[in-house]
Amino acid sequence: MGDMRWVTVGAKDQPGAGFIQEPQERPYGVEAIFRDDNGNWYSLTERSEELDFSKPF
C-alpha cells in the first residue's frame, strides 16, 4: 500500500495486542485497525487527496 510501513514494536509480545485489520484501501484513504494490550481499538489512516466511492467502506 504505497510507501506506508507498519511497525509493531513490542506489540507481538503483549497478549491481546496487534492488528485486527491489515491495511485496506477505503474511499477516504488506507486504513488499518490496531488493538492495544488494554483492548482499545485504533484506526490508523493515511488520508487520500479525494474521496473515491468506487472502493468499499
Image (cartoon, rainbow, N blue to C red):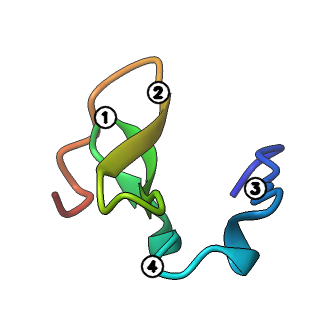
Q: Mark 4 points at which residue?
A: 16
Query: Which mark is nearer the camera, 4 or 1?
Result: 4
Q: Name the residue under label 2.
A: 48
Dot 4 or dot 3: first in sequence order is 3
Residue 42 falls in which quadrant of the image? top left
Give the quadrant of the C terminus: bottom left
Residue type at tag 1: Tyr
The amino acid marked with disc number 2 is Ser
Q: Name the element at disc 4.
A: loop
Label 4 or label 3, whichever lies nearer to me, is 4
Q: What residue type is labelled 4?
A: Gly
Residue depth check, mark 3 versus mark 2: number of the one nearer the observer: 3
Q: Reading the chain from its start, which is encountered first: label 1 or label 2?
A: 1
30 in relation to 48, above or below = below
Residue at 36% across, 44% down: 43
Quick one: SS at disc 1?
loop
Q: Distance between the residues labelled 1 and 2?
A: 6 Å
Answer whether labels 2 and 4 touch (C-beta < 8 Å): no
Query: Looking at the picture, does residue 47 appear above or below residue 56?
Result: above
Mark-to-mark CA distance, 4 and 3: 18 Å
Please name the residue that numbered disc 3 is placed on: 6
Closer to the observer: label 3 or label 1? 3
* Inter-mark Cα distance, 3 to 2: 18 Å
Q: Check contact, mark 1 vs mark 2: CB within 8 A.
A: yes
Q: Is residue 28 left or right of residue 33?
A: left
Nearest to the observer: residue 41 or residue 39: 39
Q: Residue 25 at x, y = what percent?
A: 43, 57
Q: Name the residue under label 1.
A: 28
Task: Name which residue type carries label 3.
Answer: Trp
Q: Is residue 22 left or right of residue 38?
A: right
